[in-house]
Amino acid sequence: MHWNFHAKDGREPLWISHKQNNANLVGVCKQEMLQKKNAVLVDGVILNGPIMDSKAGETFVEEACKIIMEEVVQKADDVTEKVCEWQAPEELKQILDLEMRDTGECHQKILQHCRDVIKYSVKTNHPRFFNQLYAGIDYYSLVARFITEALNPSVYTYEVSPVFLLVEEAVIKKMIEFIGWEEGDGIFNPGGSVSNMYAMNLARYKFCPEIKEKGLSGLPRLVLFASEECHYSMKKAASFLGIGTENVYFIKTDERGKMIPEELEKQVQRARKEGSAPFLVCATAGTTVLGAFDPLDKIADICEKHGLWLHVDASWGGSALISRKHHRLLHGIHRADSVAWNPHKMLLAGIQCCALLVKDNSGLLKRCYSAEAAYLFQQDKFYDVSYDTGDKSIQCSRRPDAFKFWLMWKALGTTGLEERVNRALALARYLVEEIKKREGFQLLLEPEYANVCFWYIPPSLRKMEDGPEFWQKLHQVAPIIKERMMKKGSMMLGYQPHRGKVNFFRQVVISPQELIESKKN
Amino acid sequence: MAEPSGIGNSIPLDNPGLDIAAGEEFLQEVFQILLEEGVRKSTDVTQKVCDWKEPQELRELLDLELRNEGEEQERLLQRCRDVLRLSVRTGHPRFFNQLFSGLDHHALAGRFLTETLNTSPYTYEVAPVLVLMEEQVLAKLRELVGWSSGDGIFAPGGSMSNTLAMNVARFQRFPESRSKGTWDLPRLALFASQESHYSILKGAALLGIGTDNVHLVRTDERGKMIPEELEKEIQRVKAEGSEPLFVCATSGTTVLGSFDPLDAIADVCARHGLWLHVDAAWGGSALLSPQLRHLLAGIHRADSVTWNPHKLLTVGLQCSAFLLHDSSGLLQRCHGAGATYLFQRDKFYDVSLDTGDKSPQCGRRADGLKLWVLWKAVGTQGLAQRVERAFAATRYLLEQVKRREGFQLVMEPEFLNLCFWFIPPSLRGQDSSPEFWDKLGKVAPAIKEKMIRRGSMMVGYQPHGSRVNFFRQIITNPAVTRQDLDFFLDEIQELGWDL
């Protein structure tokens, strides 16, 4: 049914009908417009017709999508394709022709740029991309993302983003169920680092709401605790919030990378003795390098005893909650006050998809963050304005990041997502067994999760005595192998030094496309 | 073929864990739906701007519940169609509600590409093209600001960019505060105009500076910061014992679209040694137009600038650049943490390209690609034409508003924000009566409700200062024509006639 807005005077919308071949078109077609008879000129600009040629634009989008489909999506599961097409930076700059000039280029040229961008970008959806805590491709999430890109919404108010607001609400509610809370609050953020920052600020606000208005100047030092294996966003957040990185007390971990609760107790006591004010403990469920899970129950006991906010950074490990087999890794998480959980990691929801979940249901999140701007959050709207949840956020405009997770969940169901997690961890287990069998491979520790950390010891070093010289030489092995694999384009895998241990590989198992075959390689 | 290996609960691991063929087929099908429903129709005036549903009804229609089992392709395709149908069409030529609107096909292709590449531009190794591209785009934006060197990063929105500015300013003056915190610092004072965006307040709270320490400086009748008032305010807070740190001048305020006088403000900042940040999230794109750049005269004197191409340049949310004049590595020193698992020093390439550590974020979206594709497609001149067109369209509408009975301008717009009241016949000639303004304040919400229910268009309204609800008409969409603008006024008139 067409909505005829011009019934009154019978005029039709003035379109530019494009008969030319689209191939050589540029974005602006002023020439054509000038030829129209009743051109309305204001300040030298023609206002009758739109400035863009919709038809040519639509054709361009179709062609670009075709390229994306063929070059990225269809090749995503093909192990014979390269993971990366290495170029040194100066060469890559030349190839890409990055310069942005005064005049535009024709569509064919732009499409070629798209092909080049694809060619020289790392294929994070390749079955042998193991470099980060994200990988792979989920078609449903991708579809959802294309939809939201085309719609270009901003999730601040119901009037402008009704669907995505309700979807976010439903997803948060579901995630909260898996944490084990009966009710709660939450919001999607541009990153786990931002979720952690939110939680830190929220805990601070709960501790002393006046800080929102008065700031920290002149107050006693607030102190927070996190394991020495925690993500660096705790430090970044502490400094951003004005707390200071020195006021993050790092708690010792055991040989498996898990926070030692007795050490936490000690540090809290120490902080009290010093006269500083402990307010927050951040436990990590799935540390970045080792994939270790802090013992949440014991940590929760300490937090309860001392009246501290417990935040669980489950950005990486949170997805284990969906697996009945593995959710025991996060046993005790329901005792947390807040949880960060990134479905864009193990669940392949697509960057970015990060939630901060909050146990409080009294509107703490809103009180902490709202500014009640009158131009956006009017109170006299004709619908229930409690739906305008955007004021809970630090952000003003915000992306509909929950939607891709929702559509994927609809497509796969909880059981499908559970299989994904179980499969990743089964693959990790398989890899661990293989590493143990193979000569020259040495496991760092038995992984709890999907991080398989190991050294590769080349034959030349195998007979060498254990000592500083051995470790020094071993330290150089991973960077060289990494360079070779990238220049070959066969695979990508991360390495790092860590807590006194020399460079080792961190193999991260996520992508459902991975096969045993590729694991063997 | 080797024996299928099953580890643990007999999960077969020899084959991929998802149905690739089905997934690709689904993607293809949705492409078709998307091109028709999401792209073609989104700029079509014969479509509704929105399909209003009450929240409870919408919940039921969407069937939001997440269940144990997955659904069939057909059901999922229907869901996709529903979402497209029930969402607001922000690309529609009659969506005037926010400081963004429209759909650019080149940028859209860039966005589809960004989604498919699915990566985070923290290091050259993982995102070589995107890292180089971000640097290129930021350099171009800096050039337009008038800087031949500098630094910057893309942030998830103008609010975050503004907050980054405050944090960098604080770090520059008190580098130790990064590690020690701000406990022992004097009470800092930040300044912004009364018309500034609320993110300055939100940012001050987040950073631990406190909203009380944001001093809002008086503006003139055109919504522009009064430099003499800024000077007074600085003196006043100094006398109270606070330490002035940072001034945020706004180039294109949210409601009125006014531009603070940057040169005069820069003089005040120079005199007191204060950091000058220019929030040009909205107005920055005027720098592209030789005709309009004078609105931001003096911007090169800023220490930092926020500029959101996702507003006027139709690039797609989000695209917000935080630009810094400093090129000594201040941003890196302020935010960098040097995490050894990500920013290794012993890589085989020049690690100064691993720019991700400059951000307080870890994972981040590659927001530069869509802007780059658009720029390549239309060139600086093409973008300038869009800006000028939006401006010309505003001038046209302004003339019409002045001519038509019942339409009363709030003020002459400097930029693209056309603010006006519609006075229905029943209230005309009664502006001396005490209830006039009270009654007038109810008009815009009533008209808004009608237009949304009808789905014919969307435009924002708000109360502002002592003024009752008025409309704020914003034109950014290059697809908007004179007919759309005539319609806009006709529609308001029609919907408000009998109020």
Image (tube, coloured by chain):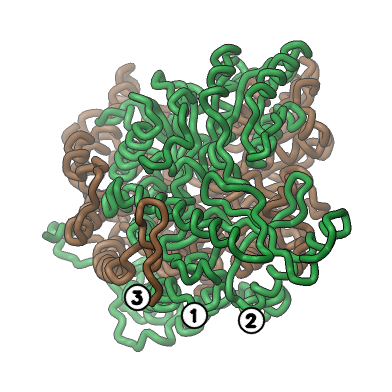
Q: Quadrant location of residue B248?
A: top right
Residue type at the position of mark 1: Thr
| Image coords of residue B194 (percent x, y) | 58, 30
Local crowd at mark 3 within 10 Å, few (<14), some, or many (≥20)? Answer: some
- Judging by the rendered image, the residue that carries numbered circle 1 is A80
- Judging by the rendered image, the residue that carries numbered circle 2 is A95
Task: Check disc 3 and report its element: helix, strand or loop.
Answer: helix
Q: Name the mark on residue A62.
A: 3
N-terminal label among 2 and 1: 1
- Mark 2–mark 1 Cα distance, whole angstroms, equals 24 Å
Q: Say left or right for B155 vs B407.
A: right
| Image coords of residue B381 (percent x, y) | 56, 71
Of residues A505 and B38, the one drawn nearer to the viewer in this rendering: A505
Residue type at the position of mark 2: Ile
Of residues B1 and A270, the one drawn nearer to the viewer in this rendering: B1
- Supply the letter of whichever chain is green: A
User: Where A164 sits versus B128, above or below?
Assistant: above
Task: Check disc 1 and report its element: helix, strand or loop.
Answer: loop
Q: Say left or right for B137 vs A170.
A: right
Q: Is the Cβ of the residue at disc 2 closer than 8 Å to that at disc 1?
A: no
- Supply the letter of whichever chain is brown: B
Viewer-side label of 3, 1: 1
Residue type at the position of mark 3: Glu
- Mark 3–mark 1 Cα distance, whole angstroms, equals 27 Å
Of residues B210 and B446, the one drawn nearer to the viewer in this rendering: B210
The chain carrying label 1 is: A
N-terminal label among 2 and 3: 3
| Image coords of residue A78 (percent x, y) | 44, 76
Q: Say left or right for B112 vs A434.
A: left
N-terminal label among 3 and 1: 3
The chain carrying label 3 is: A
